[in-house]
Each structure stands twice: as C-alpha cells, then as structure tokens.
C-alpha cells in the first residue's frame, strides 16, 4: 500500500517485467538458491508464462516473485497470502504469509524486494521468528512493512502465535536493504493477552517534531477488539507500553499514516459496521477519541474469507485516502464496489464516492482493495493506483466462482479513473488456501512511484495433487494513466449500516 519520498536506485534479480508502449511483457528468471529458510537466501523461480491464449487475451500479466519452500506437517503447502508493500526511492519491499494454516497464521513471513521500482525481484524468508527458521514461535501472521528514513531501516512487523494457537504479540525484524534481515525483537505483547491485525508506519518527514518515530496499531480480541498503540523512537529496537485511544476504539484492520507535520491518523474497521479514525498530535504520547468516517454496508462474497477492511494512503500534502468494499451503490446490496473517502486532517471526511471500475448493476463483485498514492503528487494532481480482487459474477455459486485480480488508476486525486485491467487468469476457489473460506489475504497493498503502481498479490493455480499452488506474484510497475470515468457520491440505494450487525471480539489472524 505505501510509498516513501527519497530517490535512489540499484539492481535486483528474479522476476523481470519489461514495459512496452501498450502492455507489459512478463518473464521469470532463476538463479541458484542458498538455504531456503535462512532468512536471507533465495529460492529459484520457474519460468513464468501465460497459461493459455484466453489468459493472454485477458491481459494476464502476473509473474511469480516467491513461493513456499517448506515441507513440514500442518500448513497448506505451497501457499502464500496477505501481502503488504512499501516503497522508498526505487526500492519496493513486500512481506507476506508463507505456508498458511487453516486455523490461523503461517510457517513464516516471506519477503520480496525490488531495487528497480518493481521490475526485478529477490526473495527470501525472515530469520528467527518461527521454529522453521530458528525461532521460538509456532506461527506468524498479519505481515506489514514500513521504512524509517531517519535510521535507514526497513521494519517488518508480524503477529506471533504460540504453540497453543494463541495470538500472543507483535515482533519486528529490521533490515538496512530489505534483503538481509536481523532476528526479531518483541514490540508488543507476550503478556497473556490476545492480539490481532497489527500494522506499522513511521514518521519520515523532516518537518515533523517526531521525525523517526514508528507506530504499531493492534487490537485485543479478548477485550472486544479494543485497539491499542505502541511507539518506538529508536528505529524499532524498543517500544512503549501499549495504550488505548481516549474514549477507546474497537475494531480491527487499522492502518496508521503519518502526515508531514507529524500528526498520526489511524483508520480502521469498527468490526465491519463502520470506518472510523483517531489521531495523535504529540508523537504517540496520547491518542484522541475516534471519529466516524462513515457507516458501511457490504455484500457477502461467496466462498471467500473476505471482510471490508480499509486500505489507506496519503499524498504529498498529507491528504488521506481510504478505500474499502461496499454495496451502498448497488440495488439490493447485490455486489460490492470499491469506494473512497478522503480527509485533510483525519477528523473531517469527504462524502463516500464510488470508484467506477464497472457500471452500476453490472453484477461484478469488487473486494479486498489496496490503494497507493504517489507521495510526490498531491490534490487534483495526485496519482493513485488501485489493485483489487473481483468476481465477474457476484451471484456465482461456489463451484462456479472465478476469482480475478484487477487494476485501475487516477491522475487527478481520484476524481476520474481509468478503465480496468485484468492481471491474472481466473482462479477456482478450491485451488486456494482455506482458512474460514478461500483465502488470498485479508488485505493487499499498492505502492506508487515514478508514475507507476506496484503490487504483490497471491494467485492460485490448479493444485498438484493435494498440494496447493498459490505463490506471490506481481504485474510489475503498471503505468498510472488515469482516465475519464468519473467517481461519484450520487446514487446511494442501500443505507450504510443496514446489512451488517457489529460484532466485537472478531479475530482475523
């Protein structure tokens, strides 16, 4: 989802994407691996090609950037899921679950790093978190990634799970280059409490009095999804005691963003009944009471583990953009659109607009969005990229549903949008990891840099016998072209909030 400001470059390996005048040519490279689980090794990628002529015709641009190397008993091999990305200069780092368990978490956090804006990639797996990589925790989940410009560190967070299956806390791994990672340090938890859906962000603005601070958001399922925050002022080595916002906030899927003046804004799902936000103006010493962005309402996506989690990003001026899937513009709540609200201050939010990927009433179901914003652009010139999953037919039966990945972009701050591009061949739900439904992740992400949008996402292929084939993939850097399709707040036909009853204590690790 996110991107930084500094400019830099170097070269990478693994999966190459060459840009042409009309489309992208995708291919895979392989090199000799080091240890598959040493945290810094690389595993070879098979040549990635289009599966059939129909996929080519549908612009199936995805190529593999990582795959599950493990063989232990318990998880669903070979699966990867739930990626986050962050970009700083020309470097893009993605983190994701590797070897997903049906009951929660994964064998390890994988990483894929590009030093040339998403064209080529190296990949590996974190050292020292879980037992498969020399650590003490049974599983890890909910990966997120940030960059700290003051300390020159990439910081990856993960939710650790103990041998009894309890989500016990949050750890972070640090790296100077996104390829060689230090062993983890405990940031939050290991105190007998339950934790879920953490996220991390850092203050990279030299204008801020709190330049270099990093912030972790996480919730307590054992206290009705009470959200708490923790702060680091030393590059992620030590962290403050977790504290709740004033008046308390309950929900999950929170994503902190740090504005140029140091104000931290956290948007989150109030357990799928609303999008809310709260702020800190003192470097995380205290947190204000939550405010309502909007009530939400969504169409239940057939067969998928999917809920309307927000994806949030920020432009150069500090304007905040938050997107999620919502059915308010579709008669009878028959399908989801991707919708958006924006704010200058995290307190006052715009009316919700429908992003015009497909016509109203088309029957296409859009969900699990990941938005990116070019941090060198702002306002009516802000460049936005949006990746998402979709069903061509929202009314499909489980056996007939075909999951796809799509992309649209805007060059005017989300006022108008391009036509959609399909990035992956149709996927059957039975091909995918199963965890409370077919699972590609509770979230995906996008980073916009140099006028292009980069994402890493899970795709599924027909299994090899009982072994899944669900690697991480990319379409490389896609140009932010924008278009003439207007976003609009008009035409709400389903009252937000009437389709979903709020339930506290939700867990989603």
Image (cartoon, rainbow, N blue to C red):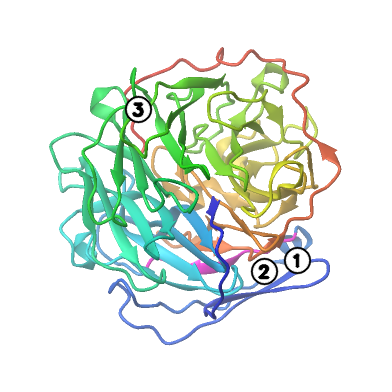
First reached walking from the N terminus: tag 2 or tag 3 = 2
**Residue underneath mark 1:** 53
Query: Picture quarter containing residue 253?
Result: top left
Q: Position of residue 491 (x, y in %)?
A: 77, 19
- Disc 2 crowd rating (10 Å Cα; few below 14, some 14-19, many 20+) is some
Query: Picture quarter containing residue 43?
Result: bottom left
First reached walking from the N terminus: tag 3 or tag 1 = 1
**Residue underneath mark 2:** 50
Q: Is residue 228 magenta?
A: no
- Disc 3 crowd rating (10 Å Cα; few below 14, some 14-19, many 20+) is some
Q: Position of residue 94 (x, y in %)?
A: 47, 60
Q: Are marks 3 and 1 in contact (CB under 8 Å)?
A: no
Q: Main secondary structure of the magenta part?
A: loop
Label 3 and label 1: CA atoms lie apart by: 43 Å
Q: Are marks 1 and 2 in contact (CB under 8 Å)?
A: yes
- Disc 1 crowd rating (10 Å Cα; few below 14, some 14-19, many 20+) is few
Q: Position of residue 72 (x, y in %)?
A: 25, 63
Compared to 347, does 203 lie above or below?
A: below
Q: Secondary structure beneath disc 3?
A: loop
Q: Position of residue 282 (x, y in %)?
A: 37, 35
**Magenta span covers which residues?**
59-68
Tell us which disc is closer to us: 3 or 1.
3
Q: Is residue 60 visible?
A: no
Q: Are marks 2 and 3 in contact (CB under 8 Å)?
A: no
Q: Secondary structure beneath disc 1?
A: helix
Rendered residue at 32%/30% (across/down): 286
What residue occupies the far left of the structure in this picture? Answer: 192
Rendered residue at 36%/63% (across/down): 151
**Residue underneath mark 3:** 506
């Amino acid at each position: 989802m996110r991107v930084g400001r500094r400019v830099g470059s170097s070269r990478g390996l693994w999966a190459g994407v060459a840009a042409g005048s009309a489309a992208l040519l995708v291919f895979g490279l392989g090199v000799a691996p080091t240890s598959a689980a040493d945290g810094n090794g690389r595993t070879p990628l098979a040549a990635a090609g289009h599966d059939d002529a129909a996929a080519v015709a549908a612009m199936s641009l995805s190529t593999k950037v990582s795959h599950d190397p493990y063989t232990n008993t318990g998880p669903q091999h070979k699966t990867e899921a739930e990626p986050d990305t962050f970009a700083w200069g020309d470097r893009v780092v993605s983190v994701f679950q590797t070897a997903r368990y049906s009951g929660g978490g994964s064998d390890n956090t994988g990483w894929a790093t590009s030093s040339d804006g998403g064209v080529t990639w190296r990949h590996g797996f974190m050292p020292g978190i879980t037992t498969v990589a020399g650590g003490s925790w049974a599983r890890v989940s909910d990966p997120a990634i940030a960059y700290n410009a003051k300390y020159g560190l990439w910081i990856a967070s993960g939710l650790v799970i103990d041998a009894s299956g309890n989500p016990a806390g949050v750890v972070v791994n640090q790296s100077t280059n996104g390829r060689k990672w230090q062993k983890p340090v405990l940031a939050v938890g290991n105190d007998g409490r339950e934790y879920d859906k953490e996220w991390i962000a850092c203050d990279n603005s030299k204008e801020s009095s709190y330049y270099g601070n990093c912030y972790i958001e996480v919730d307590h399922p054992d206290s009705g999804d009470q959200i708490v925050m923790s702060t680091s002022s030393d590059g992620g080595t030590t962290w403050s005691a977790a504290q709740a916002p004033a008046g308390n906030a309950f929900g999950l899927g929170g994503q902190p963003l740090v504005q140029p003046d140091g104000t931290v804004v956290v948007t989150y799902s109030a357990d799928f009944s609303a999008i809310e936000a709260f702020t800190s103006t003192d470097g995380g010493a205290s947190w204000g009471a939550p405010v309502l962005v909007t009530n939400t309402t969504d169409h239940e996506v057939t067969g998928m583990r999917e809920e309307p989690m927000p994806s949030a990003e920020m432009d150069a001026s500090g304007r905040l953009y938050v997107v999620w899937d919502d059915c308010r513009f579709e008669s009878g709540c028959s399908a989801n659109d991707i919708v958006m609200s924006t704010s200058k201050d995290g307190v006052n939010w715009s009316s919700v607009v429908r992003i015009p990927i497909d016509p109203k009433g088309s029957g296409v179901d859009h969900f699990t969005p990941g938005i990116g914003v070019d941090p060198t652009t702002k306002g009516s010139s802000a460049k936005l990229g949006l990746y998402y999953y979709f069903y061509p037919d929202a009314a499909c039966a489980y056996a007939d549903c075909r999951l796809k990945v799509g992309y649209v972009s805007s060059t005017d701050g989300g006022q108008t949008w391009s036509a959609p591009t399909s990035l992956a061949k149709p996927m059957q739900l039975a091909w995918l990891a199963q965890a409370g439904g077919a699972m590609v992740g509770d979230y995906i992400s996008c980073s916009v840099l140099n006028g292009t949008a980069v994402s890493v996402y899970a795709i599924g292929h027909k299994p090899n016998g009982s072994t899944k084939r669900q690697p991480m993939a990319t379409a490389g850097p896609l140009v932010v072209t924008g278009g003439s399709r207007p976003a609009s707040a008009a035409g709400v036909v389903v009252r937000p909030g009437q389709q979903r009853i709020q339930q506290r204590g939700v867990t989603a690790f």
